[in-house]
Amino acid sequence: MKITVIGCGRWGSLITWYLDRLGHEVTLYGRASSGHMQAFLQTRGNGLLTLPESVGLSTSLSCTRDAEAIIISIDSQGLRALMEKELRPLQLRNKIFVLCMKGIEISTGKRLSQIVEESTDPSNRVAVWLGPGHVQEFYAGVPNCMVIDSCDEDVKHRLVEAFSGELIRFYYGQDLIGNEIGAASKNVIGIAAGFLDGMGIPTLKGALMSRGTREISRLIQALGGNSVSAYGLCHLGDYEATVFSPYSHNRQFGESFIKGERYGALAEGYYTADALHRIAQQYGVELPICEAVYRVLYLERDPKEEMGTLFRRSLKNEF
């Protein structure tokens, strides 16, 4: 399959490396102004991995014209601008857009697949590639399980068959709403885990995972998805990689925030906390953990006080 990957950060570059290993014809796109792209152009490496000579490198989105599949891995809040201002003028048709990114558009509360569907020709199809794993571990040969989902069954099956290999066992997703919301919201839980690490109470992560999954299951159901999806690979299945791993940007951001340390890497959960706050109000869904994270990040509430608020909530049945 001929593939263009848009986004030369850690995930975009890992996807490029992985798909090249499977024998696909892959081109990695990055802006000429990107430091990541300049590193690849000069050394074919970024400090995490090295791309082989078989991988194409481009600073022009014209490389998407010949691609069958276009994989996007960028900051979620920049997706609409990419689709409407940069890709729409190319008049791309009969492409498969694959989103390997996690987030919710803050201004609209829309899922990322909805943004692509609104911004592209009807002949194009949209899929999501989600689930646990870290670049460092995949590159070191550590396998994991992930999910591909799409409203188009043929596209879903084609991608799972084309992208499966020894490093990644893919499952067929069965709930696009649940998988997208679950994947985005687990980053907020990751920040909460970082708060716990920063406060020196990591043993509470077990309760965080259990109750966090429960509240996200309510949210998914309220949005029209299957509540069971919260217990799948895209949310609960991704907790180990987000709640415990030293490689998790969201967990590390939360810990650094508590310690008053500057953290410069992208933590998608920061934006997702704002989006979930708005969605919770709109749909009347109770999200105590996510709301606590929102209040700490956006209203400058004291993290220890917010933790106390969670413990002082009214007593109730677990399920």
Image (cartoon, rainbow, N blue to C red):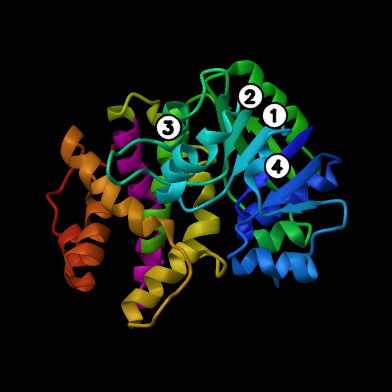
Of residue 28 and residue 181, the one placed in the foreground of this image is 28
Instruction: Please state which amino acid type lies under the numbered disc 2.
Output: Lys
Select label 3 or label 4 by which is in front.
Answer: 4
- Crowding at dot 2, Cα within 10 Å, few <14 / some 14-19 / many 20+, comes out as many
* N-terminal label among 1 and 3: 1
Q: Residues within 10 Å of mark 4 (few under 14, many from 20)?
A: some
* Nearest-to-viewer mark from 4 and 2: 4
Q: Mark 2 and mark 1 in contact? Answer it, CB < 8 Å.
A: yes
Crowd around label 3: few <14 · some 14–19 · many ≥20 (10 Å) = many
How dense is the environment of label 1, judged by Cα within 10 Å: few (below 14), some, or many (20 and up)? Answer: many
Closer to the camera: disc 3 or disc 2? Answer: 2
Q: Which residue is mark 4?
A: 63
Residue range in magenta is: 192-220
**Residue kind at label 4, given as amino acid type:** Cys
Residue 235, numbered label = none
Residue 211 included in the magenta stretch of the image: yes
**Residue under circle 2?**
156
Q: Which mark is residue 178?
A: 3
